[in-house]
Amino acid sequence: MQIKNYSAFDIIGPRMIGPSSSHTAGAARLGKVARKIGGKGIQEVTFILYGSFAQTYKGHGTDRALVAGVLGMDPNDENLSKSMEIALRDGLKYQFVLSDDEASHPNTVKIIMINEEGHQSEIVGASIGGGNILVTEINGLAVEFTGEYPTIMIRHMDKPGVVADVTHIMDEFEINIAFMKVFRQRKGEDAFMIIETDNDVPKKVLEKIRGLADEILHVYLVEGL
Amino acid sequence: MNKDFMNGNDLLGRCRGEAKKIWEVMIEREIYISGKSKEEIMGYMKGNLEIMKSAIKRGLQEDIKSVSGLVGGDAKRLRKYYETNKTLAGEQMNKAVASAMAVLEVNASMGQIVAAPTAGSSGILPGVLISAGQDFNLDDEQIVQGLFTAAAIGYIITRNATVAGAEGGCQAETGAAAAMAAAALVEMMGGTPEQALHGASMTIKNILGLVCDPIAGLVEAPCVKRNAIGAANAYISADMALAGIQSIIPFDEVVDAMYKVGKSIPCALRETALGGLAATPTGKKIQEKIFGSKTQN
């Protein structure tokens, strides 16, 4: 891991809803990343909580933060503490399951979502402190990104040339790639490209990547912390 | 030109060489690493200040209750007391302390705060800076400058040690916040960068070894009161520094000592709720009451 170049706003910040950057702000961010993966119109969501999340989620409002994230709220949204009432109003069903299983990090959650088309998707992630998160699994595929930088996630077919096409677009928009990783299930099958950037990513870039070729299945963006 | 600095010594070198205050050097560093304009950076910090102010206002005026019900209302209680009584520590000190508690109570009730440097220590810096600003008629611009002085200290501690209670105990978390606040106060009151670092050093030395033992593992108790003492610590250390009192051990060595002490604090006393106040009969009873039955929604 690189030494982070701490900004003044990493020290005096983030702006957040309390009480805990790891158990509240980080949880909201995990929920928000999940929402991107869940797709349009999430109807049902199950949160499986591990470790410290399972033991102390109530007192820290981890449950409300997770639901708020799935509803699309940021960690500093004033309505975060009312997320459950909002979910009820908007017809989002949620449940919490506590697991005794060991997770690799104490603050881990698995988020399983069913959207309006009946499509099920899931992510696994951990809140690793200071509001920072680490996403470790998307739809059963092992990945790794922190959400600290603006992050583009691309689900694509594992075919030659796809990576080059995408990085070409990044170049065209002068977006500097800080970190990039490619993950796949099996040769020639489903793959994920995770690109963490130094610059904000305009919508246009996502549209252009989406329009590249049939090999691109989905493009998601997670804004930086 | 590289505008970064690695430690207190580096920072003082820059301040001396260019005849600048810590806050100026920190803003230059921020421009350098972010590529953003000074106006943008100052504007964002001003936004943080506004959130801090409204958290203090809420905590001092409203009836706050935390998620678990364990804390809330003490900031308001203290405000009423200093407004109507002659106090031992004086109104200025009590106002800073009550303001720090106010922010932590708002935090514990799922209100909006700015982590400074963490959520659990988010009361000290706003409590101290905003109260001092009122008592000495400082404008927002000067308080924002103070926030950058504080950010410089926090950055050095984060880079060379830790500000996480789970890693270094409460000395690291509220200790860092109080050191940041002390340095900011010194510069806001016209002290030199050297004096600011002496203030920060003394602050950390005063609470070296303080453990992190939250009841039921929640950011509530003793966190609210640890923020209170952090605010008082910052005031006292800043006054000592402004009087010309020096820390015998230089800032960078104090930070290093704090880090080493933190590493030798047993795990039970680093935010695990397994030791200290959390492990007292009353602490355990409260934990059982809050988390006793593992229910599902």
Image: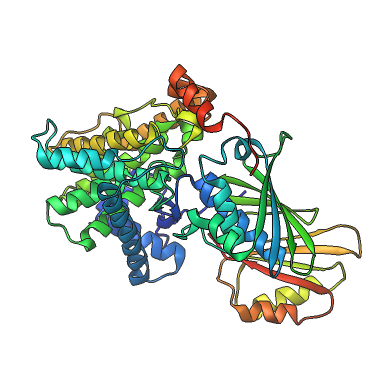
Residue B238 seen in render: no
Image colouring: rainbow
Which residue is found at the position 17% from the left and 41% from the top?
A: B80
x and y percent of residue A106 in the render? 63, 37
Q: For this view, does A175 lie left or right of residue B217?
A: right
Name the residue nearer the viewer: B294 or B117.
Answer: B294
Q: For this view, does A23 lie left or right of residue B283?
A: right
Q: Is residue A222 above or below residue B290?
A: below
Q: Quadrant of residue B180?
A: top left
Q: Is residue B255 above or below residue B136?
A: above
Q: Quadrant of the N terminus of chain B?
A: bottom left
Name the residue nearer the viewer: B34 or B1.
Answer: B34
Q: For this view, does B47 lie left or right of residue B243?
A: right
Which residue is found at the position 44% from the left and 44% from the top?
A: B158
x and y percent of residue B128 in the render? 24, 45
Which residue is found at the position 38% from the left and 35% from the top?
A: B223
x and y percent of residue B6 in the render? 42, 47
Q: Quadrant of the C terminus of chain B?
A: top right
Q: Quadrant of residue B138?
A: bottom left
Which residue is found at the position 70% from the left and 63% from the top?
A: A43
x and y percent of residue A160 in the render? 86, 71
